[in-house]
Image (cartoon, grey):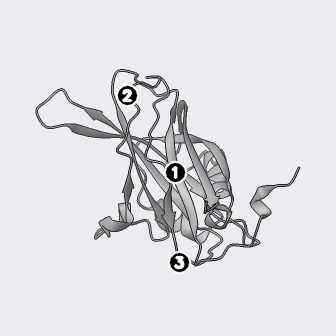
């Protein structure tokens, strides 16, 4: 078997594609969820003056899908002209939506990350099921994730009893997402 991650070294002109596809084992089945995501760095969703054009949001909920594992049908978003950075990752923020009042209310339930690149210059193409961290994303963590290998850094924080961010997983809830190098796209003639 060939690992298709090593199909070709990343080329910024081609870029990569990311899709936030759904959640698995949500805490409450009776309410809908949305996902917001952005690249970190810079982490626009958590900046004092964010560039809203760099923040993506799921909008196509599969209303006929399983309530315990909601699915979004938005598909891939292409990111081009992004230079290779070892610590670049997608920062994913999950929120619940309550329609109990006239104006919908959004609650921050969890967040996670999806690393984009391997240290040797390839897109980490694949389908991922990633644990969700409980609660609101700690804004102070944004810069630290940029300066460290993000996923190993988070796992070290989880092991640390004096973890300043008080990280914990949101039960068994996970995010389902896909990442692919755009060079793998097949064009039909």
**Residue named by callout 1:** 19
Report the residue at 43% width, 65% height from top. 43
CB under 8 Å between discs 1 and 3 = no
Drawn side of residue 27 relative to residue 99, left or right:
right
Mark yes or no: residue 166 visible: no
Give coordinates of residue 144: x percent, y percent.
54, 66
Give coordinates of residue 167: x percent, y percent.
52, 45
Give the farthest residue toward the right: 1
**Residue named by callout 2:** 63
Report the residue at 44% width, 39% height from top. 72
Give coordinates of residue 126: x percent, y percent.
68, 51
Measured in 3D between alpha carbons, the distance from the residue under mark 3 to the one under mark 2, in whole angstroms, is 35 Å
Measured in 3D between alpha carbons, the distance from the residue under mark 2 to the one under mark 1, in whole angstroms, is 18 Å
CB under 8 Å between discs 2 and 1 = no
As drawn, 27 above or below 103:
above
> Dot 3: few (<14), some (14–19), or many (≥20) neighbours within 10 Å?
few
Residue 128 disc label: none
Query: Disc 1 or 3, which lies upstream in sequence?
Result: 1
Query: Disc 2 or 1, which lies upstream in sequence?
Result: 1
User: Mark 1 falls on what kind of element?
Assistant: strand
Mark yes or no: residue 134 visible: yes
> Dot 1: few (<14), some (14–19), or many (≥20) neighbours within 10 Å?
many
Report the residue at 86% width, 54% height from top. 2
Report the residue at 66% width, 65% height from top. 117
Query: Disc 3 or 2, which lies upstream in sequence?
Result: 2
Residue 186 image-quadrant placement: bottom right
Give the farthest residue toward the left: 102
Give coordinates of residue 170: x percent, y percent.
51, 34
CB under 8 Å between discs 3 and 2 = no
**Residue named by callout 3:** 81
């Amino acid at each position: 078997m060939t690992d298709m991650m090593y199909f070709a070294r990343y080329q910024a002109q081609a870029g990569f594609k990311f899709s936030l596809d759904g959640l698995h084992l949500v805490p409450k089945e009776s309410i809908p969820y949305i996902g917001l995501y952005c690249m970190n760095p810079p982490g626009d969703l958590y900046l004092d003056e964010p560039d809203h054009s760099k923040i993506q949001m799921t909008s196509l909920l599969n209303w006929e899908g399983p309530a315990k594992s909601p699915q979004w049908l938005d598909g891939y978003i292409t990111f081009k002209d992004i230079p290779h950075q070892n610590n670049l990752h997608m920062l994913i923020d999950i929120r619940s939506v309550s329609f109990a009042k006239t104006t919908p209310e959004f609650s921050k339930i969890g967040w996670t990350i999806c690393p984009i690149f391997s240290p040797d210059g390839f897109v980490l193409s694949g389908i991922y099921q990633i644990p969700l961290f409980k609660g609101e994303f700690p804004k102070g963590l944004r810069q630290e994730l940029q300066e460290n290998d993000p996923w190993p850094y988070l796992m070290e924080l989880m092991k640390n009893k004096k973890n300043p961010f008080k990280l914990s997983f949101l039960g068994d809830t996970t995010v389902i997402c896909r990442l692919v190098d755009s060079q793998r796209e097949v064009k039909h003639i």
